Image (cartoon, coloured by chain):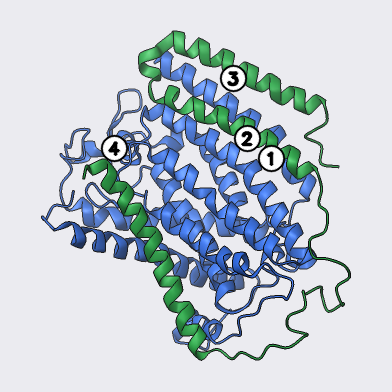
Chain colours: A blue, B green
């Protein structure tokens, strides 16, 4: 519930506007700050400098450019599916952000099975990518789409199992409760920092970030895109605004996954509750956290997506067989062991 | 309507705003973009070489095997979530039972491994 009493339509409107900002703002920031500027500096060049001061208006110029491009579809393509595919990917991003809490009262939805919902919705984009790859009637696209599907399902599992460790520790699947738990728990009786799960679930956090890297098809896991061999894989045939939709969805999802990772492992919107004498409920949290919460979340989001992009710019691409071997023979056994270890420690203490 | 169902309605609004936003921009794009179809443009792109045969070529069966493995493991993972939320109540008994379950799960993985299913080549 919101602190001020609003009719249902106004609440929904606020939420939908907030959701749009929560999707587009991270996407824009990540693309400009990391993809344009950080990558350029890491490669000893300046990046875009013409549009606006330091090229900061470049994004708007890009959108304006893509809007004017012709919308092409190959003759043999399955046209209806071909046109729907980018929409499916974009919708999945919007559905994913709906579950992220930004403050004690600043949330879009408050599912008791929030973790379930998050994992379920995040795999919808696989469907969109497979649709794009299949319907293009292009050999590159088909290969890219199949690779993407194979990769996304292989890394879905370590991600699910890594999140399971957090659920065991928190004892709930409600993301809001997970945040509260992290900030109000104590480490061996000392509650000065709460108990952010990055400390106790470090293996889980590492597996989660690796899996996110693969789910986003960022280098070193970018075989489905693979510009040098598959010419952008499932996106080969797309042009104009439909291509841009894939592009926006990719970076928006990077932002949303960083938000989710900070909710699960870094303590989300909260500050350690013992600092202000709050107890372990959202009701006791002061109202100003609804303003401070989103700022804290965005700070953590920038840090995590910065790491994702940093890895992307630093590593070469894996081979397809290395990718599958890494998921099935390393990540899944390790995450299963992590779950058992967490469960034993949870029962023992 | 209960609070629970309202949350799911919010999800529907989120899907709707994504479609509306994309539709709006596609509409703007449709107004200002050129449309000059030609034979070359509508050919599948294969790095400038004229494509040979159908775009829907045969693909590897391994993808199918990995998908099957995934379904097995994912269903098991779904089964573990409700257990994870209630572990504090189940305590040692629940822990032992889940240990047996995970052991059987690992046996399945080892079986697939020994059969060479996890090898890509």
> Looking at the image, is mark 4 or mark 3 nearer the viewer?
3
Q: Name the residue under label 3.
A: B102
In three-dimensional space, the C-alpha distance between marks 2 and 4, rounded to whole angstroms, equals 33 Å
Mark 2 or mark 3: whose residue is earlier in sequence: 2
Q: Circle 2 is placed at which residue position?
A: B71
Q: Which chain carries label 1?
A: B
Secondary element under disc 3, as helix, strand or loop, is helix
Lower position in the chain sequence, tag 3 or tag 1: 1
Q: Distance between the residues labelled 3 and 1?
A: 20 Å
Residue in the picture at 74% in, 42% down: B64
Instruction: Give me the C-alpha separation between circle 1 and circle 2.
Output: 6 Å
Secondary element type, mark 2:
helix
What whole-number distance in Å separates the C-alpha atoms at marks 2 and 3?
A: 16 Å
Q: Please, what secondary structure does the residue beneath circle 4 have?
A: helix
Q: Is any part of residue B44 visible from this angle?
A: yes
* Tag 2–tag 4 contact (CB < 8 Å): no
Marks 3, 1: nearer the viewer: 1
């Amino acid at each position: 519930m919101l602190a001020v009493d609003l009719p249902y339509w106004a609440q929904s409107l606020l939420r939908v506007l907030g959701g749009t900002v929560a999707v587009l703002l991270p996407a824009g920031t990540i693309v400009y700050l990391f993809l344009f500027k950080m990558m350029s500096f890491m490669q000893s060049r300046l990046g875009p400098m013409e549009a606006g001061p330091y090229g900061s208006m470049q994004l708007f110029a890009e959108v304006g450019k893509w809007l004017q491009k012709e919308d092409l579809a190959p003759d043999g393509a399955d046209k209806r599916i071909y046109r729907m595919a980018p929409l499916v990917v974009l919708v999945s991003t919007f559905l994913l952000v709906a579950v992220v809490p930004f403050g004690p009262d600043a949330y879009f939805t408050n599912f008791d099975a929030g973790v379930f919902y998050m994992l379920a919705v995040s795999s919808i984009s696989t469907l969109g990518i497979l649709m794009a790859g299949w319907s293009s009637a292009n050999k590159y696209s088909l290969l890219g789409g199949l690779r993407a599907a194979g990769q996304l399902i292989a890394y879905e599992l370590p991600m699910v199992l890594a999140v399971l460790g957090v659920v065991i520790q928190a004892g709930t699947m409600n993301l809001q409760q997970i945040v509260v738990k992290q900030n109000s728990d104590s480490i061996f009786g000392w509650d000065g920092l709460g108990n952010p799960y990055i400390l106790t679930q470090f293996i889980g956090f590492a597996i989660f970030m690796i899996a996110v890297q693969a789910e986003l098809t960022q280098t070193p896991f970018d075989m489905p895109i693979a510009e040098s061999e598959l010419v952008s894989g499932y996106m080969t045939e797309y042009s104009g605004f439909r291509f841009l939709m894939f592009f926006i969805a990719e970076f928006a999802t990077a932002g949303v996954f960083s938000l989710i990772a900070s909710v699960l492992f870094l303590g989300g919107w909260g500050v350690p509750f013992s600092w202000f004498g709050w107890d372990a409920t959202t009701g006791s949290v002061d109202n100003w956290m609804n303003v401070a919460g989103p700022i804290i979340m965005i700070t953590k989001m920038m840090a995590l997506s910065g790491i994702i992009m940093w890895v992307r710019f630093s590593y070469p691409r894996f081979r397809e067989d290395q990718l599958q071997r890494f998921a099935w023979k390393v990540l899944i056994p390790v995450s299963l062991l992590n779950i058992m270890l967490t469960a034993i420690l949870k029962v023992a203490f | 309507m209960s609070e629970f169902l309202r949350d799911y309605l919010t999800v529907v609004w989120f899907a709707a705003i994504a479609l509306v936003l994309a539709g709006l921009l596609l509409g703007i794009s449709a107004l200002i973009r050129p449309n000059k179809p030609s034979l070359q443009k509508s050919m599948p792109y294969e790095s400038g070489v004229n494509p040979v045969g159908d775009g829907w070529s045969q693909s590897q069966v391994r993808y199918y095997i990995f998908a099957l493995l995934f379904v097995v493991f994912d269903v098991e993972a779904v089964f573990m979530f409700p257990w994870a939320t209630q572990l504090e109540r189940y305590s040692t008994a629940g822990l032992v039972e889940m240990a047996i379950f995970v052991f059987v799960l690992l046996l399945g993985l080892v079986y697939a491994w020994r059969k060479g299913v996890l090898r890509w080549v």
